[in-house]
Amino acid sequence: MKEVLLPIHIEELPEGGYLATSEELPGLVAQGRTVAETLEIAQDVAVGLIESYLEHGDELPPKLRGAMPSLGEVRIPIPLP
């Protein structure tokens, strides 16, 4: 199984909590109470988005194409900033 490190942008929200997005995986938006929770949610969202791409026969974003595993599963470790 291949893995890819997906760059994630984390920002603190004025109303509290954190927001995670990724320019390399459009549609990835995750919000949590802590940075750790936000990253965990972002990882789940990223996996779900990639599975959706595959199920619908859509082409993955360019940075993810080379990371396609042969078994159809993707695990994305998200490094802390």
Image (cartoon, rainbow, N blue to C red):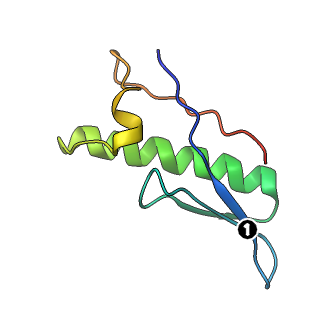
Quadrant assignment, res 63: top left
> Could you tell me which secondary element the residue under label 1 belongs to?
strand
Q: Residues within 10 Å of mark 1 (few under 14, many from 20)?
A: few
Q: Which residue is mark 1?
A: 11
| Left or right of 58 on screen, residue 39 | right
Q: Position of residue 33 (x, y in %)?
A: 79, 65
Q: Name which residue type carries label 1.
A: Glu
Q: Nearer the viewer, residue 49 or 21?
A: 21
Residue depicted at 44% across the width and 51% down the height: 25
Quadrant assignment, res 21: bottom right
Residue 43 vertical position relative to residue 11 in the rendered view, above or below: above
Q: Position of residue 12 (x, y in %)?
A: 78, 71
Residue 36 vertical position relative to residue 6 in the rendered view, above or below: below
Residue 78 vertical position relative to residue 26 in the rendered view, above or below: above
Residue depicted at 55% across the width and 45% down the height: 44
Q: Position of residue 17 (x, y in %)?
A: 79, 71
Quadrant assignment, res 6: top right
Residue furthest left in the image = 57
Residue furthest bottom in the image = 15
Q: Nearer the viewer, residue 9 or 27?
A: 9
Q: Position of residue 43 (x, y in %)?
A: 59, 44
Residue 71 vertical position relative to residue 59 in the rendered view, above or below: above
| Left or right of 37 on screen, residue 57 | left
| Left or right of 1 on screen, residue 56 | left
Total residue callouts: 1
| Left or right of 11 on screen, residue 4 | left
Residue depicted at 38% across the width and 20% down the height: 69
Residue depicted at 47% across the width and 14% down the height: 1
